[in-house]
Image (cartoon, helix red, strand yellow):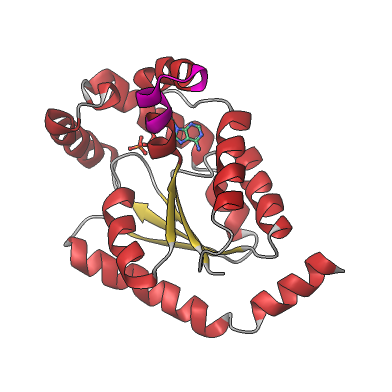
Amino acid sequence: MHNIVLFGPPGAGKGTQSQKLIAKYHLVHLSTGDLLRAQIVEGTPLGLTAKKLMDEGLLVPDEVVIGMIGSALHNNRQAAGFIFDGFPRTTTQAESLDRLLAEHGTSVACMIALEVGEEELVTRLLGRGKTSGRPDDQDEIRIRRRVTVYNTETAQVAGYYAAQHKFHALNGIGEVDAIFQHISSIIDQHQAAGSEAPAAATREVKA
Ligand code: ADP
């Protein structure tokens, strides 16, 4: 399995790039935001609780998203790999992801971070809000709160992967296709270099 964490603040372009990566690498896309919005549409109790937090730009509790990812991994055991989009967003989530993937005999290959400054993010999300229908895209105060939550609670997750030598950052401003080429080149390097590493990881887990 080849598992990639796509990282960056809200509006950095993770969703756009994920779509292109799915087509190229045939990976399963796991977006916790999308999974939560599906729960809201279904009107589940989880969805109702999550909606209040999401609309305000706050994180939903770790155990909620970790549970959703655990189920998704279980339900997609035949996948060639996963693109994690919007997860992990806290160090607790990152630790849980490592544990869950180890249970499936696999691991995170790399984290790729898209870097975009706050004013560009606000412009992009206000633009998206005109068509997305998402309450959290509808006003500047909520958007800036999401960016603040990213800076205070989520950005530190980069350090978790840097310590494992799996972190790559790139400029998220520019042509979508040029950014995609850059992401692809990082993934291709990891795939080429990692052809022996997954076997080693599997042996560790089984031991
Ligand atoms: P964006 O990254 O553009 O803000 P997402 O769809 O990834 O959009 O997330 C929307 C909202 O869903 C977040 O602001 C948060 O409330 C909730 N959410 C998504 N993923 C997580 C997560 N891993 N942990 C906690 N909350 C999450």
Q: Is residue 59 left or right of residue 94?
A: left
The residue sitting at 49% across, 16% down in the picture is 49
Corner quadrant of residue 83: bottom left
| Residue 55 image position (x, y, % from top left) | 35, 19
Residue 127 vs residue 133, the one in the foreground: 133
Residue 203 vs residue 124, the one in the foreground: 203
| Residue 118 image position (x, y, % from top left) | 28, 38
**Is the residue 16 above or below the residue 201 in the image?**
above
Residue furthest toward the right? 207
Please state the quadrant of the image where ligand 1 appears: top left
Residue 162: in magenta span: no
| Residue 94 image position (x, y, % from top left) | 61, 46
**Is the residue 194 above or below the residue 14 in the image?**
below
Region of the chain picked out in magenta, as a range: 38-46
Check the picture and name the quadrant holding the C terminus.
Answer: bottom right
Give the tally of numbered discs: 0
The residue sitting at 59% across, 59% down in the picture is 77
| Residue 103 image position (x, y, % from top left) | 73, 56
Q: Is residue 22 left or right of residue 48?
A: left
**Is the residue 173 above or below the residue 154 in the image?**
below
